[in-house]
Image: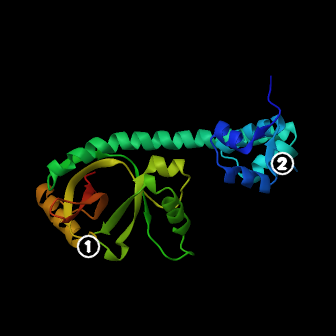
Amino acid sequence: MIKSKYSTKQICQIFNITRETLRHYERVGLLDPYINPDNGYREYSYWDVSTLVDILKYRSLGFALSDTKDAIFDMDFPKIVDMMENHTEYYTNLIQQYQLLLDKAKRDLPYLKSAMNHIGEISEADMVDLFFIPYTTDSDNEYFPSMRAAFEHSQFFSTALYINGQNHDMDCYGLITEKTYADFLKIKKGTHIKKAHIVCQIVDVIGRTPIDETIASDFKRSITRMYSKEFDTIYAILISRFYDKEKRYHQYYFTFSRLE
């Protein structure tokens, strides 16, 4: 037999929610329990219980309280279907985002584990398409919207430095990611660094000083001697920073230049 009324304590125990949560739902008009005039206690009916089930369902789908209230009390069925379709698209996009982050973590982790054992070594590798966004504090700058979007999705990005060997006025700090991620995030304005065969080195910068032109210049001199050719552009990507056992601060940078 269905119980006709529940106390506040029973509702809190059944749904694992707090009294304050119930009061808040009541204040915004989502719940309207009967208040017993004899003792002032709230009594929740089967209707209140079923309403609370719907509230928690819509909240678990990411609905705001105002949208939840509309879905329960004001929307007709087609509008509810439309709202659910929108949330289906939202979660599909979210799943794609987390899948990309998982793939990124699986690729980055082995490289990160081996980084310490290869500090200073110069080697060759194949680099995927990258996307670089320069820092700017000017809200009118053409790159400002891209920078804001990158900060909002910082889990996809790393700090980077771009050094132009021919024109140092073009040297700049910024954010870098794989072009695939920038495309997924619909970030259009930035510099596309096309995939290439590269020469690279992991550099350990000790101290809190950001990487500067000196580090890149050392790398450039080394690879110029090795390959007997000039390299115009050097990139440096921050891959990790940490304290060692002696409390020294380290910054690992992945420096590279195109061979092709």
Outermost residue, top side: 1
Eyeballing the image, is 220 above or below 3? below
Eyeballing the image, is 196 above or below 6? below
The amino acid pointed to by label 2 is Asp
- Which residue is found at the position 26% from the left and 56% from the top? 256
- Along the line of sight, which residue is nearer the eye, 244 or 82? 244
Eyeballing the image, is 257 above or below 90? below
- Along the line of sight, which residue is nearer the eye, 196 or 204? 204
- Which residue is found at the position 39% from the left and 43% from the top? 104
Is the image coloured rainbow, by chain, by secondary structure, or in one colour? Answer: rainbow
The amino acid pointed to by label 1 is Thr
Eyeballing the image, is 82 above or below 193? above
Locate residue 154 relative to residue 209 in the image: left or right.
Answer: right
Residue at image mark 1: 209
Gap between marks 2 and 1, in whole Å? 60 Å
User: How many numbered circles are shown?
Assistant: 2
Report the disc number at residue 32: 2
- Along the line of sight, which residue is nearer the eye, 45 or 245? 45
- Along the line of sight, which residue is nearer the eye, 91 or 67? 67
- Residue 141 location in percent, x, y? 53, 73
Locate residue 78 relative to residue 10 in the image: left or right.
Answer: right
Mark 2 vs mark 1: in front: 2
Report the disc number at residue 166: none
Outermost residue, left side: 225
Locate residue 255 relative to residue 106 in the image: left or right.
Answer: left
Q: Secondary structure at mark 2?
A: loop
- Residue 135 location in percent, x, y? 44, 70
Task: Assess disc 2: are there few (<14), some (14-19) or many (≥20) residues with their C-alpha within 10 Å of its C-alpha.
Answer: some
Quadrant for the N terminus in the image: top right
- Residue 18 location in percent, x, y? 64, 49
- Residue 242 location in percent, x, y? 26, 60
